[in-house]
Amino acid sequence: MRIGVVTFPGSLDDRDALRAAELAGAEGVALWHAEDDLHGVDAVVLPGGFSYGDYLRCGAVAFHAPVMDAVKRFAADGGPVLGICNGFQILCEAGLLPGALLRNQGLRFTCRPVELEVANTSTPWTAGYAPGQRIRIPVKNGDGRYYADTVTLDRLEDQGRVVLRYRDNPNGSERDIAGVCNEGGNVVGVMPHPEHAVDPLLRRGTDGLAIFASLRAGAQPLQRSR
């Protein structure tokens, strides 16, 4: 299993995501924002950080990068794609996920561990968890408040596309949503940082490791056309 991690100008957590993939037993593959080539990886991660300095708005520049054309094709073919924090924002800007990430309620940057509930275990990224499992993963964001109109929120709920839900909402996200997926289930965006909860030496627990291990441990991603 080869998990590619894209580096954009301003990415901060790309190396952490590569390390998490390796701790999960996969091969981490560094991908570059200016290349329209995913080099044959089996899954793609858009990591956290401040791509292009968050100019205009978070993710608004990054989704125009050449690599995103390849990511869109990969996702359309059923390839597993994960966006973490800024990566989630990029996926929303690119139209691969619904909704938007707005300034946190209270307009303050939040950095702390949060308790989450796994609401959907049918995606390639969450199949390693039990339904309803409580996990603890750090968040660190200033624009992490998930927002969508009522019709979209109802659709996400009805279709089971809420992937993670906050137990203690740190940013005012609508309906405590911490992560969502697309209709096919192969594209997932989460605001918490699972790559920062994979190594016991960091004393943040290891609840995030299953995000990366799910693919290799038997979760069956959608079949991609060749």
Image (cartoon, rainbow, N blue to C red):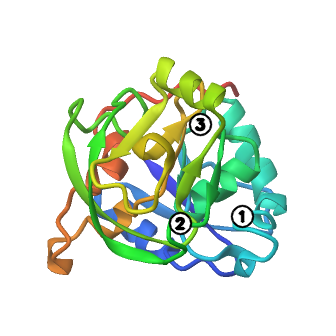
Mark 3–mark 1 distance (CA, rounded to whole Å): 21 Å
Quick one: label 3, few (<14), some, or many (20+) residues within 10 Å?
many
The numbered mark at residue 133 is none
The type of residue carrying mark 1 is Gly
In this rendering, the answer to whether 83 lies above or below 56 is: above
Q: Residue at x 38, y 42 (%)?
A: 164
In this rendering, the answer to whether 29 lies above or below 210 is: below
The numbered mark at residue 59 is 1
The numbered mark at residue 79 is 3
Q: Residue 37: x and y, percent?
A: 75, 55
Return the residue at label 2: 104
What is the secondary structure assignment of the residue under circle 1?
A: loop
Dots 3, 1 in contact, CB < 8 A: no
Q: Residue at x 45, y 62 (%)?
A: 171
Mark closest to the chain's N terminus, 3 or 1: 1
What is the secondary structure assignment of the residue under circle 2?
A: loop
